[in-house]
Amino acid sequence: MARKVAEWIGRLGEVWVEGQVAQLSRRGAATVFLTLRDPAADLSVPVTCSRDVVDRPGLELAEGARVVVRARPDYYIARGSFSLRATEIRAVGLGELLARIERIRRLLAAEGLFDAARKRPLPFAPAVVGVVTGRDSAAERDVLVTARRRWPAVRFAVHHSLVQGPMAAASVIEGLQRLDRDPEVEVIVVARGGGSVEDLLPFSDEGLVRAIAACRTPVVTAVGHETDTTLVDHAADVRAATPTDAAHRVVPEIGEQRRLVDGLRARARHLLGTRLEQQERWLDSVRSRPALADPQRLLHGRGDDVEQLRTRARRTLVHRLEGAERDLEHARARVAALSPAATLQRGYAVVQRADGSLVREPAEVADDERLSVRVAGGRLPVRVAREDGEP
């Protein structure tokens, strides 16, 4: 089986492999041994090459350098080991790394992950702060010590992750997502100390940038020194220059807040005192007015006015009553003058038949007809007796 594997590998020919130099040894005069590490899978493979390949002009090979190797796979049957025999080594320079980061930045910016509208404000005085950082790192101490000094009541949920190497991005994503699911965590700080562009490369990983943009919890990044900028800084809600600066941004300073509260109290006390003084002056001015200072004074002299008004009202009422009485007498006299009884008093009489109907014409009555004559003093029965020649 091992022989078949060796034959299969031998048929592969030369391949191009990209990786990072983990170890470099120049044991012999003609052969150089190095270990090539895959930054994505955390795998290593031994590589051998001639000194001419390593000493090529323009190639400065050192541990930690990123290179592209053209090599032939080799399988040693006796030990069952796999190695590469390099025929050409090219350095992956800083310019290429920066160009790759720039391409990723443009892609994510085009998707809107860096838009200012996505940025969320940080909570004031969060009770629990999540921290993703390296174990026992200076960045962790800077964040925790500074934050506790500024706001002693703050608590931390710390997730220790890898912050360098091929597995760092996945480790930071895991901690970020775990803290984002914690309902007590109000803000998350991703912190790492300074380093080279290669050291900070995991913080420009596309997957990590997308994970930060997807967080529901506000994220503060503090990666590297003030001059270092990684892609996570563009996606974070707040970018801090250093881990210490991140602590300053996530929690307030207790002394400053106390001074602020004292100032607000003094201002409120001054405003309240001024308002009370204004109200007291207003109350004194109101109390000094005659209506409130001496209410009885307003009643003095008003009795005579009331009596005069009463007399005037009585006189007016009597005058009105007398006028009405005279009008009534005049109306009564007119009614009496127009009544039938008054007419009878003047000597007039009313002649009526037996059925009560009035007699207006002499021709209306017959001879010997009995009539009733009404005068002022009463009634008189009469009988009609015409003389000769009368109608």
Image (cartoon, grey):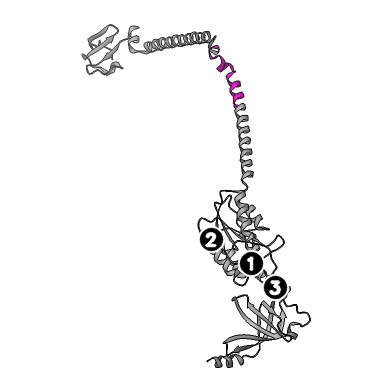
Mark pair 1, 3: CA separation: 13 Å
Residue 40 painted magenta? no
Q: On residue 203, which mark appears? A: 1
Q: Which residues are magenta?
A: 279-297
SS type, badge 3: helix
Q: Which circle's residue, 2 or 1, is located before the other in the chain? A: 2
Q: On residue 179, which mark appears? A: 2
Q: Residue 130, percent across and down?
A: 56, 58
Q: Dot 2, crowdedness within 10 Å: few (<14), some or many (≥20)? A: many
SS type, badge 1: helix
Q: Amino acid at mark 3?
A: Leu
Residue at point 57% right, 66% down?
173
Mark pair 2, 1: CA separation: 18 Å
Q: Amino acid at mark 1?
A: Phe
Work out whether residue 303 or residue 280 is closer to the camera in this orientation and state it.
Answer: 280
Asked if the residue under mark 1 is in contact with the one under mark 2, i.e. CB atoms within 8 Å, the reply is no
What residue is shown with label 3? 97
Q: Residue 79, percent across and down?
A: 57, 87
